[in-house]
Image (spheres, grey):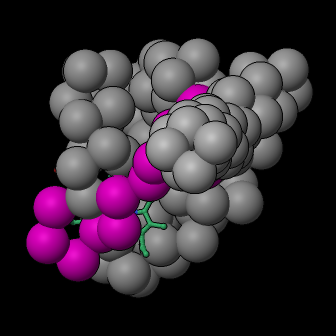
Amino acid sequence: MSSTTPKRLRCRLATFALGLCLMPAASASAGVASTPRAPAVIYAKTCGYCHGQHVAPVIRGRNLPPEIIAQYVRSGPRAMPAFRPTEISDAELKALAQWVSTSKADPKEHEQ
Ligand code: HEC
């Protein structure tokens, strides 16, 4: 008995730890995927906080390629923060990049 118990315990601990690791990942991606926000909402709440507000360059009305926009959002170069898939999902980012790329310039926005 004394030789089998630790083995069983170790196994249970491993299963428990694995469950802990998988749980947040599964629930986070499910939560984001089930409620995609509209691109204009994400832009207004997140990007527009800096872009067009004397903090960062205007990005609307410039026909910037969607791939470049998505790359900036994920990598966050220099003074721009990076956004993770838990903050802006892949599906949201795809729609957002397309929206920014094709959106018209907003006359209320200012260059940095
Ligand atoms: C905290 C402020 C801030 C937020 C929020 C922010 N950005 Fe930026 N962004 C910047 C800054 C500053 C730069 C200029 C970085 C540099 O030095 O090249 C930049 C650069 C960019 C560029 C390149 C522009 C160019 O002229 O080369 C794109 C595209 C961009 N951001 C997209 C986005 C999108 C889309 C969002 C929303 C998800 C966003 N940014 C949110 C600060 C921000």
Instruction: Report if residue 106 is visible in the image.
Output: no
Q: Position of residue 30 (x, y in %)?
A: 77, 24
Q: Main secondary structure of the magenta part?
A: loop
Left of 14 or right of it: where is 37?
Answer: right
Image-quadrant location for residue 51: bottom left
Q: Nearer the viewer, residue 6 or 58?
A: 6
Instruction: Kindly give the residue lying farthest to the right in the view shown.
Output: 35
Relative height, residue 55 to residue 86 (above, below)? below
Examine the rendered structure and indicate whether residue 13 appears above or below residue 108.
above
Q: Indicate the position of residue 95 as horizontal and vertical percent values.
A: 57, 18
Segment tinted magenta in the rendering: 77-89
Residue at image location 14% in from the left, 72% down from the top: 78
Residue 8: x %, y % from top left: 61, 37
Magenta-span inclusion, residue 30: no
Residue at 23% across, 50% down: 75
The answer to whether residue 40 is left or right of residue 49 is right
- Residue shown at 29% from the left, 68% from the top: 80
Assign the N terminus to one quadrant of the image: top right
